[in-house]
Amino acid sequence: MSKRLRDPVHGLIVFDVENDPVDRLAWRLLDTPEFQRLRRIRQLGVSEFTFPSAVHTRFAHSIGVFHTARTLVRVIAREMRRNGGTPDDRKAEVALIAALLHDLGHGPFSHTFEHVQEARGARKRHEQWTAEIIRNPAGRIRPLLEAFRAGFAEEVAALLEREDPEDIYHAVVSSSFDADRLDYLRRDKLMTGTGAGGIDFDWLVENIRVAPIALDAPDGDDATPHRVRTFCLDRKALPAAEQFLLARYTLHEQVYFHKTTRCVEAMIGRLLAAVADAASGAGNAVERTGLPAGHPLLRFFGEGGETVQNYLALDDALIFGSLDAMTTAADPVIADMAARLRDRNLYKTLDLAEFGADKGRQASRQRWIEEEFADKIANGRVIRDDQAAIGIYAEIGGDEDRMHKRLHILDGGTPTEISRLSELIRALEPKKRFRRFYFADKADRDAARQIGRAR
């Protein structure tokens, strides 16, 4: 007996629940409230404001990641046997379930929510929330994992929390070719309808090899860098690897950092920050936010506290469904942001690339606009956005400089970072920074544009 799901990226995904204990556990995990919550969290947050079909969820993505992880585990077994080694079934089980559960800790609008929390001094990333949800003794995840094997919940949580890899099985969930990016790059490209380059998945997987790389540069002459085995690519896959990174770069440029998407993220961030201030500050939070008493946002940001239970009550659907109520808020920022987001009456964007690609020219225009609109920047009627930057390794999360996240090619049997072999990739290594302003009033945007052109 098996269970089947149809997926637009992978086709038929089969769970052999009768003969495979990991598949059986995975199928049971899908039905937990914690995992079902991912149906209500968009994979691309607010990208549907720009790309209407980008409504795929982290639920579908996570299943795709599990399916891809099974392929990578088979690759590890293949490479180990090729080199006279023996696969470690227990570590493979941990990696597979970690791949399935890796996104449990995402909050509403994912990275936008994290940025709001960071600004409030709460620096818990979604990986930490994921581990806490897995370890939660009152949740539905932990009992299933412990029934599979004593201590299994801790093994899975620890793998997802670990920043530095310890063995090849960590590469399944964190590497240049981890299951997460091998799914989301293809899924996001498909669901947004963008021509973001081709990914020759089958050829790349066929040419994955396992080799040790140095994680840390030596501090002195006698220092020995820590080495760990991870995924590399055979030399003949270099052209496919170049296309893989180009597709990733293009997705960041055209989708993840699209000016309208960034504008909506900034507006939602401002809305959530205002709700958090109202919920945690003095005064009547219900009146100030327009939300009913006991609303999950008021519980999380207010007296209920940032507990796992309160966190799991938050998702995209909840916030989108609360916009109408928040339009009645006494707080003018909350009321304005909620009405604008509900009706897609967005701030107007000025991208300083309009004034040319020269970085110095853009920087000077940015200073002039900041001086002219200083008061409105201070009160939020103008939002400055100069933090987005992409390079060939750019990714949301900012860990692209970690060596195990960089792509290595076997050159004469030696793992070599791809930019040393490819002029194309080397040319795209310097980061491209975006400089944008979002204006509540179109007249202000037009005036700022004239300032940029006139000087």
Image (spheres, helix red, strand yellow):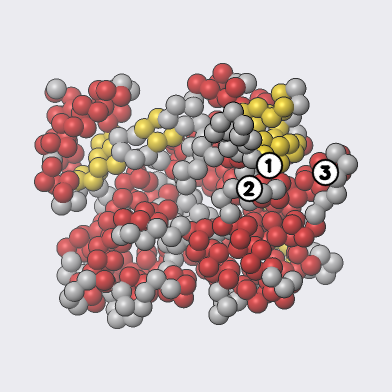
Element carrying mark 1: strand
Depth check, front residue: 172 or 366:
172
Residue lying furthest front: 222
Residue 170: mark: none
Q: Which residue is mark 2?
A: 165
Alpha carbons under labels 3 and 1: distance apart: 14 Å
Tell me the SS state at disc 2. Answer: loop
Q: What residue do we see at 65% from left, 27% from top?
A: 416
Tell me the residue at 31%/55% (across/down). Answer: 119
Q: Are marks 3 and 1 in contact (CB under 8 Å)?
A: no
Task: Find numbered disc 3 in the image and state the secondary structure of the residue it sits on.
Answer: helix
Residue 323 in picture, x, y percent from top left: 31, 66
Q: Is residue 246 left or right of residue 280?
A: right
Viewer-proximal residue, 144 or 214? 214
Amino acid at circle 1: Val
Q: Nearer the viewer, residue 30 or 76?
A: 76
Q: Looking at numbered disc 3 in the image, what kind of residue is underneath it?
A: Met
Q: Position of residue 49 (x, y in %)?
A: 38, 50
Q: Earlier in the sequence, mark 3 or mark 2?
A: 3
Mark 1 vs 2, N-terminal side? 2
The disc label shown at residue 80, or none = 3
Cα separation, mark 3 vs mark 2, equals 18 Å
Tell me where residue 395 appears, x and y as whole percent. Answer: 49, 41
Q: Residue furthest top?
A: 423
Do the residues bearing badges 1 and 2 touch, measured as CB atoms within 8 Å?
Answer: yes
Q: Nearer the viewer, mark 3 or mark 2?
A: 2
90, 55: nearer the viewer: 90
Residue of label 1: 228
Q: Is residue 189 above or below residue 450?
A: below
Neighbor class of circle 3 (other Cα within 10 Å; few <14, some 14-19, many 20+) is: some
